Image: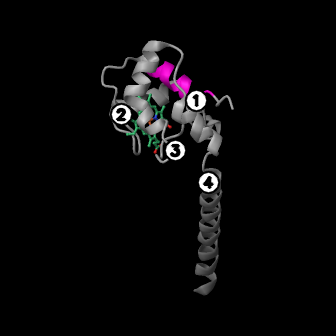
């Protein structure tokens, strides 16, 4: 009996260990952004006045705020893995809401081009 069960146990043990390792690595990767990035995010705003107006009205409260869970504007470490999902996926996630972000990122009247401009701006690495 033991001979049948033991290999199975150690197999799932290996999977659990691998999972724990993955989670640990994932955690250590989400290090807090630097003071410079937090400062950049607090004041950065898009060049285009219309995009800037929407950004300040809808997105900045979270994405410009170092105490929020949102990927900070200019924080390349936070944005790169998200950009890898592709612009379409990101836009769909904003529209339906994801994690702590409400649907539409609170911009109910934003169109696809506007979301794209906002995302491109926020994902642009901070000039610091
Ligand atoms: C109430 C706070 C809040 C507001 C307002 C907000 N966001 Fe977010 N946003 C978040 C949080 C928190 C996340 C991280 C969600 C997660 O992955 O758990 C996020 C993630 C994102 C992502 C990444 C989604 C993904 O699939 O990884 C994009 C893109 C984004 N926000 C765009 C926007 C845009 C554009 C606006 C303004 C129109 C906006 N957000 C407004 C809190 C906010």
The stretch in magenta equals 115-124
Question: Label 3 belongs to which residue?
Answer: 66
Q: Which of 24 and 61 is in front in this view?
A: 61
Q: Give the quadrant of residue 109.
A: top left
Looking at the rendered image, the disc whose residue lies closer to the viewer, 4 or 1, is 1
Q: Does the residue labelled 3 lie within 8 Å of ligand 1?
A: no
For marks 1 and 2 on the same chain, the one whose residue lies earlier in the sequence: 2
For marks 2 and 4 on the same chain, the one whose residue lies earlier in the sequence: 4
| Separation (CA) of disc 2 from disc 4 | 25 Å
Q: Does the magenta stretch include residue 116?
A: yes
Question: Label 2 belongs to which residue?
Answer: 96
Question: Label 1 belongs to which residue?
Answer: 123
Q: Which of 72 and 39 is in front in this view?
A: 39
Asked if labels 3 and 4 touch by Cβ distance under 8 angstroms, the answer is: no
Which disc, if any, is residue 26?
4
Q: Position of residue 64 (x, y in %)?
A: 49, 36
For marks 4 and 3 on the same chain, the one whose residue lies earlier in the sequence: 4
Q: Where is residue 53 in the image (x, y as percent from the top left)?
A: 41, 19
């Amino acid at each position: 009996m033991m001979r049948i069960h033991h290999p199975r146990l150690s197999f799932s043990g290996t999977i659990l260990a691998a999972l724990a390792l993955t989670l640990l690595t994932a955690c250590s990767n989400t290090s807090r952004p630097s003071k410079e990035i937090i400062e950049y995010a607090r004041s950065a705003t898009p060049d285009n006045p219309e995009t800037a107006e929407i950004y300040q009205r809808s997105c900045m409260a979270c994405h410009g705020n170092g105490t929020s869970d949102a990927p900070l504007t200019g924080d390349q470490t936070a944005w790169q893995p998200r950009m890898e999902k592709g612009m379409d996926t990101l836009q769909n996630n904003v529209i339906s809401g994801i994690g702590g972000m409400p649907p539409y990122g609170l911009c109910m009247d934003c169109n696809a081009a506007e979301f794209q401009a906002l995302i491109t701006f926020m994902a642009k690495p901070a000039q610091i």
